[in-house]
Amino acid sequence: MSHQETRLSGNWPAAGSKEVALDYFNAAMRAFNIYRGDPVALADKAIETAPDYAMPYILKAYLFGLATEPDAVVEARSILATVQPHAKSELEKSHVDALNALLANNWTEAAVKLDRHNMSFPHDMLGLQAGHLMDFYRANARDLRDRIARVLPKWSEDQPGYSILLGMYSFGLEETGDYGRAEAIGREAVERDPLDCWAQHSVAHVLEMQGRAEDGIEWMASREPNWSGDDNFFKVHNWWHKALYHLDLGQANEAIKLYDARIREGKSDVALDLVDASALLWRLHLEDHDISDRWADVAACWDNHADGKLYPFNDWHAAMAYLGSGRDEEVDRIVNQYRNAPAGGGETSRWAAATGLPLIEGFRAFWQGRYEDATEALHGARFIANSFGGSHAQRDIIDWTLTEAALRSGNRNAAEALANERIAVKPHSPINKRFLGRANA
């Protein structure tokens, strides 16, 4: 049962409403699949046409629940309360069960429920994509790969959505280090569907992790019209990838130009875009570029999201902006929220205590010039794969900051060891070569 074939439930108010609602839902799913357009508006059209149809409500609940923004989660909980009486089929009730776990801040529980859901409904693209995003947000590389591997044999190449599935599988292969297959399958997915910006970004990750910066710039430029449109939700993240390539090549001025003209062009206050803004500014700071006048607007946008409760990965990136803009009291607010959080607050509260706190404290120590303290805090905190927080490329900022802290603290043994570690993974990276040169100087 594909998302085009999802079973409808409820009483239909007029002849033809079922088909019209399904058309709107499929259009909303297509927008979600390629992160382009407005899936919420299309889902609303489906609901307006057929108020008893559960799937558009479920799609909206995932869209808001996966946004990692406090206000969006409140809206997702409201949608979920509305849809529960309409969820009649086993597929629909299974989605509601997963959403209840997600919106209680128990991401792994929700992801495991969708593991089982995907086994029962291997052609339900909504379940697959929502589960894939949960795996991404909790940094579970294995499930990013295996969630798709489990169902791929059930699909045929001529089924609608097959290329989208390949794009997700490519990203899972990349995050588990299978770079050759990841690149090949990602390129195939983009050839099949040039508008699939998730597959585009998967290949970008491969090139980033392999240190192929020149190839990365060419890859992004060659298909730029397909991923950079105003209606593309993922465009800022793909611009961020291109900026990383320039930074790795020592072309910081090009990265700064992309930051000003693309990444912060529209002053987005979407959490995903703010993560990219904070992360690029911090990297530029590590390279001793003066970007002090750019921190304040990012910090102001984080005020709506960094509550110290919902998603520690966001709080940590907000803390970077707060440090950069001199708003230390906001860093204290987040840290105090972590330390004083009541027991039993869900999985994200455990993420905050175990990893979010040392990350923020380590970055604060670095900003304040307490490099020995930063080295101590970040060495253990960097081992967060399969815990929470985005991709290997995003989390590399921890190791980058750690290595720089070791160098500035005068800890030559640690600096050389960390530089060797980075060189082993990306031997052609100018940044890594500079690390090793400075450690040996």
Image (cartoon, grey):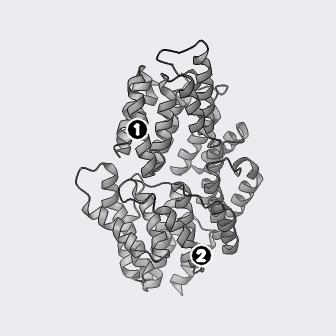
**Label number found at residue 125:** none
The quadrant where residue 289 appears: bottom right
At x 38%, y 41%, the residue is 102
Residue 233 appears left or right of 139: right
- Quadrant location of the C terminus? bottom right
Residue furthest to the left in view is 343
Considering only vertical position in the picture, is 62 above or below 227?
above
Query: Mark 1, residues whose alpha carbon is within 10 Å: few (<14), some, or many (≥20)?
Result: few
Residue 171 appears left or right of 86: right
Q: Secondary structure at mark 2?
A: helix
Q: Secondary structure at mark 1?
A: helix
At x 51%, y 19%, the residue is 7
- The residue that disc 1 covers is 78
Indicate the position of residue 182 as horizontal and vertical percent values: 60, 46
Q: Pick the residue in front: 349 or 439.
A: 349
Indicate the position of residue 5 as horizontal and vertical percent values: 57, 21
User: Which of the marked residues, 2 or 1, is nearer the chain's N terminus?
Assistant: 1
From where the camera sits, is residue 138 visible?
no
Indicate the position of residue 84 as horizontal and vertical percent values: 38, 28
Give the amino acid at mark 1: Ser
- The residue that disc 2 covers is 433
Query: Mark 2, residues whose alpha carbon is within 10 Å: few (<14), some, or many (≥20)?
Result: some
Residue 173 appears left or right of 344: right
Residue 180 appears left or right of 172: right
Q: Pick the residue in front: 169 or 282.
A: 282
Q: Pick the residue in front: 330 or 198.
A: 330
Tell us which disc is closer to us: 2 or 1: 1
From where the camera sits, is residue 307 visible?
yes
Considering only vertical position in the picture, is 252 above or below 227?
below
Give the amino acid at mark 2: Lys
Indicate the position of residue 435 as horizontal and vertical percent values: 55, 77
